[in-house]
Image (tube, rainbow, N blue to C red):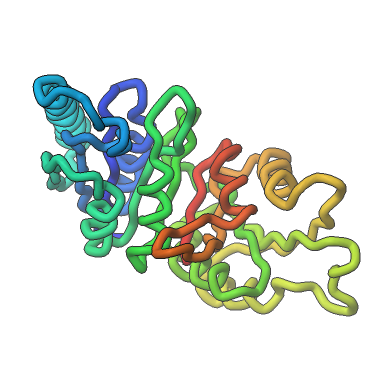
Amino acid sequence: MKDLIVKLEHEKAHDQALAFAVSIAETFSAHIAGVAYGNLAGLPDYGMAGVPGSVVADILAQSEQSARAALTRFHAVASRNGISVSDHLVLDTGFGTADTFATFARHYDLSVIRQSDDDGPDNSLIIEAALFNTGRPAIIVPYIQSDELKLDRVLCCWDGGAPAARAVNDALPFLKRAGTVEVLNVVSGRDEPKGEIRGVEIANHLARHDVKVEVETVTVPDRSVADTILSHAADKSADMIVMGGYGHSRLREFVLGGVTRDILRSMTVPAFLSR
């Protein structure tokens, strides 16, 4: 884990991803790049229809000012911690923010992005682009996050699929530093394996990388898979969830799968996602 990129937010109150990304960079002695948007990001193009040019200019000026302030905070935090940094300031007036972020992110080991919430930035499209359009993993940081990177216990969601395998592999730098890694199988009663414990082989693989591993199978009750994962993470005081990102393409637009979408909506600990 030698370099990572973090999407910076305009308001200081929304800097959870910045603080978490800096702690990752400190842990791995990594380079960190910050990208700030001083454009019309977050505003749909139809919202600009009929708006006077002078008003649009004022919006752009305020957005650029906020983006530059975000970069100032970024450099202040990074310099205080002695981290190698670089930055990207995007000032174009287009609406391709997610594509722009994906283009940057392809050149880094990891993206760090704040979770969307109703009272803060909407990063949904950027998260989807980072997950589906970069070939790189991403960590989504909850908007309630206050702790820096902790790896006492990491939860790896395992279903035997390719996205889950990719996530486990991409997360190895974190898993090797974890106190304990739990490989979690979430199954329904009718799908519960007979005569075998799913996840043993991937646990053996991780053990060969000197990762301390446990395997646990949880049967889904009446609630959803996402609720089961999040409840289990809370019960075990997990510091991070590692999981494959699922979804599909719809007319060149990526759509998150149900479990991934629900985890991102209700998460209370950082989620490491790969696809």
Q: Is residue 132 above or below residue 127?
A: below
Please give the name of the residue rendered at 20% of the width and 48% of the height, measured from the top-left corner: 33
Whole-percent x and y of residue 175? 50, 60
Residue found at the far front of this picture: 50
Whole-percent x and y of residue 59? 17, 23
Quarter where residue 35 is shown = top left
Q: Is residue 209 above or below residue 107?
A: below
* Nearer the observer, 16 or 10: 10
Q: Is residue 37 above or below residue 218?
A: above
* Nearer the observer, 176 or 263: 263
Q: Quadrant of the N terminus?
A: bottom left
Picture mark count? 0
Give the left or right position of residue 170, taking residue 9 as reference. Answer: right
Please give the name of the residue rendered at 58% of the width and 53% of the height, measured from the top-left corner: 260
Q: Is residue 274 above or below residue 43?
A: below
Give the left or right position of residue 32, taking residue 184 as reference. Answer: left
Give the left or right position of residue 183, taking residue 136 as reference. Answer: right
Would you say residue 147 is visible in this rendering?
A: yes
Quarter where residue 246 is shown = bottom right
Would you say residue 76 is visible in this rendering?
A: no
Please give the name of the residue rendered at 48% of the width and 70% of the height, measured from the top-left corner: 169
Please give the name of the residue rendered at 29% of the width and 45% of the height, measured from the top-left corner: 6
Whole-percent x and y of residue 136? 36, 64
Whole-percent x and y of residue 3? 25, 57
